[in-house]
Image (spheres, grey):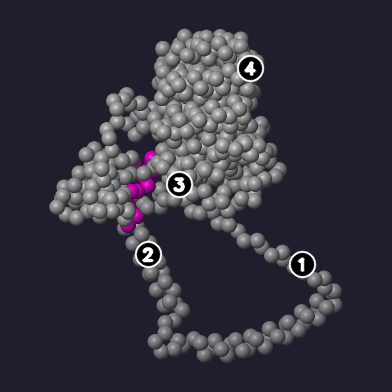
Amino acid sequence: ATVFANAMMNASTTNDSFLRENLDWLARATNWSKFSATAGLGVIHKGNIKNSRSVLSPYLPSSASSSSPYSEGGSLYAIGMMHSNHSAGITEFILDFLVSTQNEVIQHGACLGLGIAGMGSEDTATFEEIKNVLYNDSAVAGEAAGLAMGLLFAGSGTDLAEEMLAYAHDTQHEKIIRGIAIGLAAIQYGREEKADVMIEAMTLDQDAILRYGGMFAIGLAYCGTGDNSAIQKLLHFAVSDVSNDVRRAAVLCLGFVLAGNPELCVRSVSLLAESYNPHVRYGAAMALGISGAGSGCRESIGLLQSLWKDSTDFVQQGALIASAMLLIEQPESRQEKLRERINHLHGNRGVELMTRMGAIMASGILDAAGRNSTLSLHTDVGGLRRSAVLGLALFVQHWYWYPLTHTIALALKPTALIGVDGTLAPPSDFKTVCDCSRTTFAYPAKVAVESKKLKEKMPKAMLSTSRKKKTDEAGKADKGAEVDKVDKMDEDTVPARGEKSNADALVDNADKADAAVESEKEGASRFELGNPARVVPMQRDFVRLVDDNRWRPVRFQQAGILVLKNTKPDDPVEYAFTDEEKAGENATGEQPAAEPAPEPFDYVPS
């Protein structure tokens, strides 16, 4: 949980100093803990695709015999995370390691890396190589292979799904069946009615694991649509299926169907949150977190607070994680109760381990990416982000497999407003104004680290006769001090020349305080944002353009990237970055050579 929290807090920042400064602590990690710790580097360096191989070079598999397969497998998983949505050139790199090894741990990491990096690419050659790993019938490698095959063909509805379903009936390994089930659900992403044939085949299957996957097939196929028939199916399985896993998944997937509509999700799961079955209560909590991710919905938080003190530890864990998903990048005043709860739980040895783990994970989600990113399943124009939806679908599988917690980083979206000119560089003199107090949406204060207090010495025992003697001596000394004090007061009542009396000083201090408050009020209602600027979701309604700015956006929006038009092209331009290459010029002052245009493609929001 600590490794996950560190990875989330530093997601996409390339700041891995915590791991480097605590190598002795990290060295205690063994087996899959080592795998997960190495994979966390992929979250920290997510998007750093130019330096991905150099960053992970100490951990990547070598040509010699494998000395640490868990670190090597984790590094391949990490490099896939770093290249999510940027698979060009890295797919072949990971594929070489997959083909050249028979170690199931390395195969597991390679399959996850290939699936995440090549999400939705429909790469048939890679699919065939991963299918060979699946057919080896290794439980560990086969689970990741099933997930990767689904991610490669996410949203395609390919006929290869029938082949995967047939193998799920043939194998005896539950891990492989579960991996295939979630992979099949990913293939049906966004297909709505076109996915009904596969949904029916999975939901009516005798195997509870495939029915579990069927719930995710409904959730992903109808994600964000609010479709009534999908909601009815999920509610039916939530109250009637004999498997707790299926019931939990059915309630949880209501969050996907109702993504972006947290108020309706609250009404749908409010009664389920009071169910006698803890699995149903857990599903209700996670559904609230998914449907309202980053929204701070008050109704959802109110319902989740009742689950913070649930009698079952894993329900408390889910409620804490879901609350963090809702309150990420919200004002500190709204996060206060959750942070107090987290601080009470995470170091309390009297609390169940599952609850403490949830508190630590929630802390990492709240402070994701240095408090510069939010969780969002939608783009700024309202479309679904495929990588975010599938990332959360994989994240909730941490119920069975903890290394999948890192995939929640795929749902992070920067809370920034960046204006760029024709060279795609941000001019420093582009300004916007925020019509609210600077402190309302400011970064939360850093946690104060208390210094170790010295143990106080216990008072010495004293006899009653000794105490009486000291009391008499103290009384005589007080009488002498009072006489001296009266004499001194006579001297001090008249202030020296040029000095102010105590009363005058108090009046001056009060005037200064009032002036400070007034000046703060005058500047509190508005402040200027630079370029780039941090703009959290609730702050967007207060952001507007400066009237007399030379830079005018082609299309104005309160967050994301603005393409700017220079209304005074003859004036010199200063950029926010001093590096000439970032400013759009190379060392010779010439414009860099243009990149070749990409081949025609169909755009899918991710």
Residue found at x 26% / y 50%: 585
First reached walking from the N terminus: tag 2 or tag 1:
1
Pick whichever, 34 or 4, lies toward us.
Answer: 34
Instruction: Pinpoint residue 116: horizontal percent, then vertical percent.
Output: 47, 30
Inter-mark Cα distance, 2 to 1: 46 Å
**Residue corresponding to mark 2:** 516
Q: Are marks 2 and 1 in contact (CB under 8 Å)?
A: no
Q: Amino acid at mark 3?
A: Thr
Query: Mark 1: few, some, or many residues within 10 Å (few <14, many ≥20)?
Result: few
Pick whichever, 108 or 569, lies toward us.
Answer: 108
Task: Report the disc number at residue 458.
Answer: 1
Instruction: Pinpoint residue 12: horizontal percent, then vertical percent.
Output: 45, 43
Magenta span has 532? yes
Inter-mark Cα distance, 3 to 4: 42 Å
Residue found at x 28% / y 44%: 424
Which portion, as a residue range, is magenta? 523-540
**Residue corresponding to mark 3:** 13
**Secondary structure found at label 1:** loop
